[in-house]
Amino acid sequence: MPAAIENRQPAAAHQWRWQYVFPAAKLTRDKNTGDFYRNHLGESVVQKAVSEAVEKAKVIKKACCQTLRHSFAVRLFEKNHDLYTVGNLLGHKNLRTTLVYTNAVARGERKVLSPLDA
């Protein structure tokens, strides 16, 4: 928990929004205070887990973490969610980034399948 937030909001450490969804297995020691804390999983650990899951599920097409984000965004557009909602859920600061996913929805009419649809 950043000290500035902890000082302003003493209960913040117990709120869900400040928790890691994928916490690291090991604790890390703060060099300045000597306190222990838990960091989040590194990107490579999550990517490896997704790769192993794809292999275990016998998905024959190439799939990665970005494939999940892409599929999530496309499904939201297919269910008629608006551009602002999808962009907000994906953490996009610029709506042009979100617009890229609308092209995939239009191509879907030409029977382009996701790796999970194969």
Image (cartoon, rainbow, N blue to C red):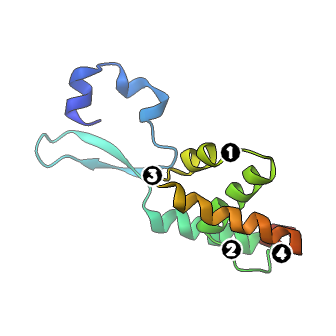
Badge number at residue 82: 1
N-terminal of the two: label 2 or label 4?
2
Horizontal and vertical percent for residue 112? 83, 75
Q: Check the picture and name the quadrant holding the C terminus.
A: bottom right
Q: Residues within 10 Å of mark 4 (few under 14, many from 20)?
A: few
Q: Check the picture and name the quadrant holding the N terminus.
A: top left
Q: Amino acid at mark 3?
A: Lys
Horizontal and vertical percent for residue 48? 56, 70
Asked whether 4 or 70 is in front, the reply is 70
SS assignment at label 3:
loop
Q: Which residue is mark 3?
A: 93
Give the Cα separation between the discs numbered 2 and 4. Answer: 15 Å
N-terminal of the two: label 1 or label 4?
1
Q: Residue at x 30, y 42 (%)?
A: 37
Q: Amino acid at mark 4?
A: Val
Q: Amino acid at mark 2?
A: Ala
Q: Residues within 10 Å of mark 2 (few under 14, many from 20)?
A: some
SS assignment at label 2:
loop
Q: Which residue is mark 4?
A: 112
